[in-house]
Amino acid sequence: MLIFVWGFILLLAIAVIFLIWAQFTNQGAALSEIQLNQQLEKKVIHLEENLKKTLEIMQDLAKKMHIQQEVIDKTTTKLSQVELQNAELVGLLTKAVNSSDRPSI
């Protein structure tokens, strides 16, 4: 009977040692998971900051391109006006040359 009691006590001691070992293993895994989560959070924050900077740069570029497009449109309009004026001048010069080429009466 004494052997059964000592066997039972030994079995309980082994169970307690196993539970303590399992607890430490779980704590180590939990610490690793916490560290991994912290690293992932840092990476996410870093990526969000980069995304904000990229968005700001893209918005600035879009504004600059819009301004350049407006300048190009104005320049095109002015060039069209100059071409029309040149065409009128050529027409007037042609009339002037044609009228000066006619013999005077």
Image (cartoon, grey):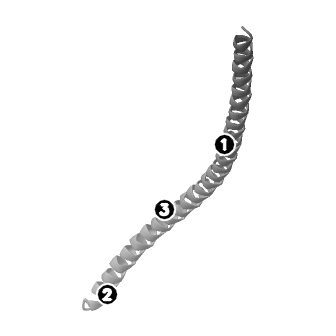
Q: Can the viewer see residue 105?
A: no
- Judged from the image, the secondary structure of the residue bearing numbered disc 3 is helix
**Sequence-first disc among 1 and 2:** 1
Pick whichever, 38 or 64, lies toward us: 38
Identify the image quadrant of the N terminus: top right
Q: Image height check: is 98 above or below 50?
A: below
Residue 84's tag is none
The total of numbered circles placed on residues is: 3
Q: Which callout, 1 or 3, points at the residue further toward the start of the chain?
A: 1
User: Viewer-nearest of labels 1 and 3?
Assistant: 1
Front label number (2 vs 3): 3
As shown in the figure, which amino acid type bears the numbered disc 2? Val
Q: Position of residue 22 (x, y in %)?
A: 68, 29
Residue for badge 1: 36
Tag 2 residue: 97
In front of the other: 80 or 36: 36
Secondary structure beneath disc 2?
A: helix
Q: SS class of the residue under badge 1?
A: helix
- Distance in Å between CA atoms under marks 2 and 3: 36 Å
Real-space CA distance between mark 1 and mark 3, rounded to the nearest whole angstrom: 54 Å
How packed mark 1 is, by other alpha carbons closer than 10 Å (few <14, some 14-19, many 20 or more), is: few
Q: What residue is shown at x 39% (from left), y 78% (from top)?
A: 89
Where on the picture, by quarter, is residue 37? top right
Q: What residue did someone put label 3 on?
A: 73
